[in-house]
């Protein structure tokens, strides 16, 4: 049995981790960490856990927790993990960080886009970017896994095969993305109040969203050269889910069947990526699941390809991907605990 500790268990991603792990055959949550709710029963905060757990939330530090568990999930705001993680902790337990603290190899990129100092640059060298479908082999031997962002997971996976094969001009890539309100976290913020979000849609982080360099870094690795993209996120009035529409110039004439073969080459055996042929991705058909739905369409008039992707930001975009990483780390079936059918309606 894998002993699990969750730091930040009362945030949306932390609660999703707890929910997924509740039915995981090989893992048990030993500790629900929360500074805000220390001493309160987890089930009193998330009443969907009524009678499922009697554990209380605790204000634990990483070092003491690492001596009690096999893996720690840090579902915390940016800056927490870099300030509190050290090599001694990693000698005791594996860490899967859901924040952006260890997603970049270059600390200066993190500091520029996150507008905060990185407190532990040394550990950036060994952190593995935890996008399972791309870095599976690297993840297997890791002690520290940087769980990808939600926008980034959808954006990268949607374009990755065509970037890797050199079919599209990476510098021409434009990503328009939409996200539900849960992507902003559980903290009380005026822009996320019901009346502020309902019956509206708005762009934000235009030209400076912190997920931009994360997408660029991973696609640049795939392309073998630096890529610069345009990324614009939008907030829409739903609880959860991400939809991306991406546009890129084709480098050469190519057919729909040829593009499909490229996607099959990279994703044909992937459990959680569904490449659609007759329909376009919709948030409602991935909600509550670890699936990513992807589709594409060639626009011959403009010599561009339009790529589309959808996922649940709290599962494949956060907690589900984290559990997938845990499964890889501990050499168990990668899909275990994650084979939820999307919930509809």
Image: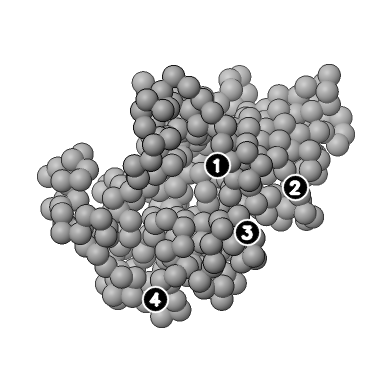
Q: Secondary structure at mark 4?
A: helix
Q: Nearer the viewer, mark 4 or mark 2?
A: 2
Q: Does any portion of residue 31 appear in the rendered image?
A: no
In primary-sequence order, the first of circles 3 and 1 is 3
Residue under the image location 38 percent in, 40 percent down: 189
Q: Residue at the spot x=35%, y=45% of the render?
A: 187
Residues at circles 2 and 1 in contact by the CB criterion of under 8 Å: no
Pinpoint residue 338: horizontal percent, then vertical percent. Answer: 39, 44
Q: Earlier in the sequence, mark 3 or mark 4?
A: 4
Q: Nearer the viewer, residue 133 or 32?
A: 32
On the question of residue 122 being in view, the answer is yes
Secondary element at tag 3: helix
Residue 20 in percent (x, y) is at 32, 46
**Nearest-to-viewer mark from 3 and 4:** 3
The first of marks 2 and 3 along the sequence is 3
Comparing 82 with 170, the one in front is: 82
For residue 248, side relative to residue 190 (left or right): right
Circle 4 is placed at which residue position?
A: 89
Q: Provide the residue designation for mark 2.
A: 228
Residue bearing mark 1: 151
Check whether the beta carbons of the residues at disc 2 and disc 3 lie within 8 A of each other.
no
Position of the C terminus, as image quadrant, is top left
Q: Secondary structure at mark 1?
A: helix
Which residue is disc 3 drawn over? 112
- Disc 3/disc 1 C-alpha distance (Å): 19 Å
Q: Is residue 50 above or below residue 64?
A: above
Which label sits in the foreground, 3 or 1? 3
């Amino acid at each position: 049995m894998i002993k699990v500790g969750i730091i930040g268990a009362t945030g949306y991603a932390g609660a999703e981790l707890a929910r997924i792990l509740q039915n995981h055959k090989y893992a048990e949550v030993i500790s629900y960490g929360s500074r805000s709710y220390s001493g309160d029963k987890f089930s009193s905060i998330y009443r969907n856990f009524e009678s499922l757990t009697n554990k209380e939330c605790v204000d634990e530090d990483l070092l003491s927790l690492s001596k009690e568990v096999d893996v720690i999930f840090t579902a915390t705001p940016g800056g927490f993990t870099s300030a509190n993680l050290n090599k001694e902790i990693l000698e005791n337990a594996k860490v899967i960080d859901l924040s952006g603290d260890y997603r970049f190899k270059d600390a200066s990129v993190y500091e520029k886009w996150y507008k905060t100092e990185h407190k532990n640059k040394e550990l950036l060298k060994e952190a593995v970017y935890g996008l399972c479908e791309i870095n599976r082999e690297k993840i297997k031997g890791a002690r520290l896994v940087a769980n990808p962002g939600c926008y980034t997971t959808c954006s990268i996976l949607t374009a990755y095969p065509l970037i890797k094969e050199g079919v599209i001009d990476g510098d021409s890539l434009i990503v328009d993305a939409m996200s539900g309100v849960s992507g902003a976290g559980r903290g009380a913020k005026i822009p996320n109040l019901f009346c502020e979000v309902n019956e509206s849609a708005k762009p934000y982080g235009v030209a400076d969203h912190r997920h931009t360099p994360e997408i660029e870094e991973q696609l640049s690795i795939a392309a073998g050269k630096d890529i610069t993209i345009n990324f614009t996120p939008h907030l829409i009035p739903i609880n959860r889910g991400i939809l991306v529409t991406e546009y890129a110039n084709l480098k050469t004439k190519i057919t729909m069947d040829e593009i499909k073969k490229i996607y099959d080459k990279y994703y044909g055996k992937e459990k959680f990526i569904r490449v659609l042929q007759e329909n376009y991705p919709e948030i409602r058909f991935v909600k509550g699941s670890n699936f990513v739905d992807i589709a594409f369409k060639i626009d011959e008039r403009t010599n561009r390809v339009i790529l589309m992707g959808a996922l649940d930001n709290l599962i494949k975009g956060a907690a589900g991907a984290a559990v997938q990483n845990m499964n890889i780390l501990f050499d168990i079936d990668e899909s275990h605990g994650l084979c939820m059918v999307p919930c509809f309606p």
